Image (tube, rainbow, N blue to C red):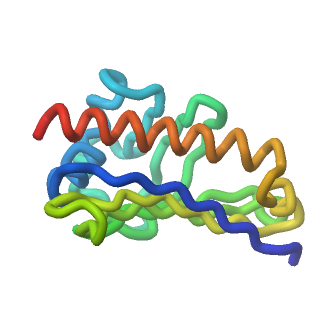
């Protein structure tokens, strides 16, 4: 149904993947360095305790939604949100040892959009550009915060 559009934004961070993951999962401190808000729907769970099928509350500044967690591993954090069949997105954050920055991390956001309105996220579209700019801003803020704490 519809098509699939994929968006990717990545950045090099001069810190270990473990450090990047630690700062990324420190949701309660996001307000200190970024405008995004991510939290568990179950306030008794710490971010590192979240498991697949747990619900999240996410506010990216431009959009609020309640996705379902798909993965929370040492290598990735992934959720799925949708207004199926109109629009669906699987968003993945990964932190891998960098092949470009010795001792560093490649932090990557990737989302696969599907559904009847997925074409709105086609490369070059205004929706795609706005989302990608938001992701790049988050990535830059995360880099700055991680490197400050390292």
Direction bottom: furthest residue: 1
Residue 8, image quadrant:
bottom right
Residue 46 seen from this side: yes
| Residue 84 vertical position relative to residue 142 in the rendered view, above or below | below
Residue placed furthest toward the left: 150
Residue 73 visible in the shown view: no
74 vs 18: above or below? below
Q: Would residue 93 be found to the left or right of residue 120 on screen?
A: left
Q: Could you tell me which quadrant the N terminus lies in?
A: bottom right
Q: Residue at x 16, y 57 (%)?
A: 16
Q: Position of residue 78 (x, y in %)?
A: 44, 64
Measuring 77% from the left and 58% from the top, which residue is drawn there?
123
Examine the rendered structure and indicate whether residue 104 appears above or below residue 39: below
The residue that appears at 58% across and 29% down in the rendered structure is 61
Q: What residue lies at 70% left-to-right and 39% top-to-bottom? A: 130
Residue 18 coordinates in the image, percent (x, y): 16, 58
């Amino acid at each position: 149904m519809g098509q699939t559009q994929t968006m990717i934004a990545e950045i090099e961070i001069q810190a270990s993947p473990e450090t990047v993951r630690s700062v990324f999962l420190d949701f309660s401190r996001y307000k200190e360095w970024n405008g995004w808000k991510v939290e568990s729907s179950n306030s008794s769970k710490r971010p590192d305790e979240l498991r697949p099928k747990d619900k999240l509350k996410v506010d990216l500044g431009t959009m609020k939604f309640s996705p379902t967690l798909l993965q929370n591993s040492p290598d990735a954090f992934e959720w799925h949100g949708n207004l199926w069949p109109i629009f669906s997105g699987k968003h993945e954050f990964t932190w891998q040892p960098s092949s470009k920055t010795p001792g560093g991390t490649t932090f990557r956001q990737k989302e696969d959009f599907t559904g009847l309105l997925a074409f709105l996220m086609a490369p070059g579209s205004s929706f795609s550009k706005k989302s990608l700019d938001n992701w790049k801003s988050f990535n830059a803020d995360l880099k700055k915060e991680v490197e400050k704490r390292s």
